Image: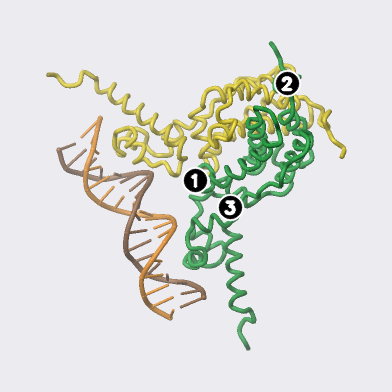
Chain colours: A green, B yellow, C brown, D orange
Amino acid sequence: MPAAPVPRAEQRRRTQDRILAAARKLFAENGYDRTTIRAVAAAAKTDPGLVMRYFESKEKLFARIAVVDRHEPVDGTPEQVAELLLASLGEKVTAEPAAALAAIRSMFTHPEAAKEVREAMLAEQRQAAGTMPVPDADLRTGLIGALTLGTVIGRYLLGLDGLRDAPPEQITALLRESFHSIVHGDPDGPSARSE
Amino acid sequence: MPAAPVPRAEQRRRTQDRILAAARKLFAENGYDRTTIRAVAAAAKTDPGLVMRYFESKEKLFARIAVVDRHEPVDGTPEQVAELLLASLGEKVTAEPAAALAAIRSMFTHPEAAKEVREAMLAEQRQAAGTMPVPDADLRTGLIGALTLGTVIGRYLLGLDGLRDAPPEQITALLRESFHSIVHGDPDGPSARSE
DNA sequence: GTCTATAGCCCGATAGAC
DNA sequence: GTCTATCGGGCTATAGAC
């Protein structure tokens, strides 16, 4: 009987896809340094040589899979901006952002991962800050980004009680007032205590 | 002339202190995996053998310096609890918590560091949740911890615009209303949008 | 084209010289 | 007590066998 009816090119593409999926999973679980080409190859049921042949280096393989999705443009009234940023967080806690988690897990120990996360956050931050004509816009939008990152880390990477399993709507409901007060609240806040 | 008038024990203690300071700095800057005993020894102006002699292993040296300060007990009315948690964040952004940063930078790639950070956060979270007789107390206090961690990461490890250089009081002022609304706000929030 | 073998490097840890 | 030399092992990346 004839051999597999799968064209060589198709076979090759499938192997590459298996490698990419294995890399995404292992980099997200163990970070850049502790993920080895050997382990990726084993998980993808190939061998290390082929991984190198297809992706050139461990560094380039990582760059292929560790991407942080860029935000959609943010604009409108302060109320709308706050809701858009909250919706952005809502997406992240609704579907596990596997590729971004690979970048986030490695960002403290791998400069390329840090750059990827930092630049994605700064782009969103600066764009949002552009809609706010207040002197502390950078701080306000930086805080929103930091809170969003903290929530993602707490939910997926630390698995904190309550946060790990909470329904997305419950998380966004509890954070709605925070996002609004940070984006367009009085700096001294209605809740400021003089005590 | 006589040699150094420094007793042996004193000399030894000084060397150990130099090693600990160098380890704290390098682990905080580069994380566990990328910090080598060789580099610590060089930074402390000794040699690797002596580092191993004094601290037994890289793992034990790391455990000595990567500690997260435990919180003070939290109690009182919901308003007071929110203010105490906010004050806790205020301390962290007032003085750079070097030892905690070493643990945080390594928490995603080194299990012992993850345990240290996680347990410190869970202890504070559970203690705070104990003061709140609501079903979603875990989620509320988990969010507070996540926001606090995100703020520390954004300020010291990512150096986000606005957050990196902001005066501590400005940060806590912007977060005050958030902490109050998360700790004791209506779950559906006064700002809930039905759109 | 696919895979095996290995070169070359750096590491943590140890043994023993001084 | 302090330091040097080295062991054993894991890694990325490469060279070459099939």
Furthest residue toward left: B1
> Badge 1 sits on which subunit?
A
Q: Residues within 10 Å of mark 3 (few under 14, many from 20)?
A: many
Q: Is residue A165 at all visible to an observer of this figure?
A: no
CA gap between label 2 and label 3 equals 39 Å
CA gap between label 1 and label 3 equals 12 Å
Furthest residue toward front: A133
Judged by depth in the image, the label closer to the viewer, 2 or 3, is: 2
**x 61%, y 31%: residue:** B151
Q: Judge from the rendering whether residue A42 lies leftward or rightward of residue B60; answer left or right.
A: right
> Badge 3 sits on which subunit?
A
Disc number placed over residue A189 in the picture, else none: 2
Furthest residue toward right: B194
What is the quadrant of the N terminus of chain A in the image?
bottom right
> Badge 2 sits on which subunit?
A
Residue B30: give x, y in percent of width and height: 45, 40
Q: Quadrant of residue B15?
A: top left
Residue A116: give x, y in percent of width and height: 57, 47
What is the quadrant of the C terminus of chain A in the image?
top right
Name the residue carrying label 1: A111
Q: Is residue B167 at all visible to an observer of this figure?
A: yes
Q: Is residue A6 above or below residue C18?
A: below
Q: Are marks 1 and 3 on the same chain?
A: yes
Q: Could you tell me which secondary element the residue under label 2 belongs to? A: loop
Name the residue carrying label 3: A66
Residue B4: give x, y in percent of width and height: 20, 21
Q: Could you tell me which secondary element the residue under label 1 belongs to? A: helix
Q: Could you tell me which secondary element the residue under label 3 belongs to? A: loop
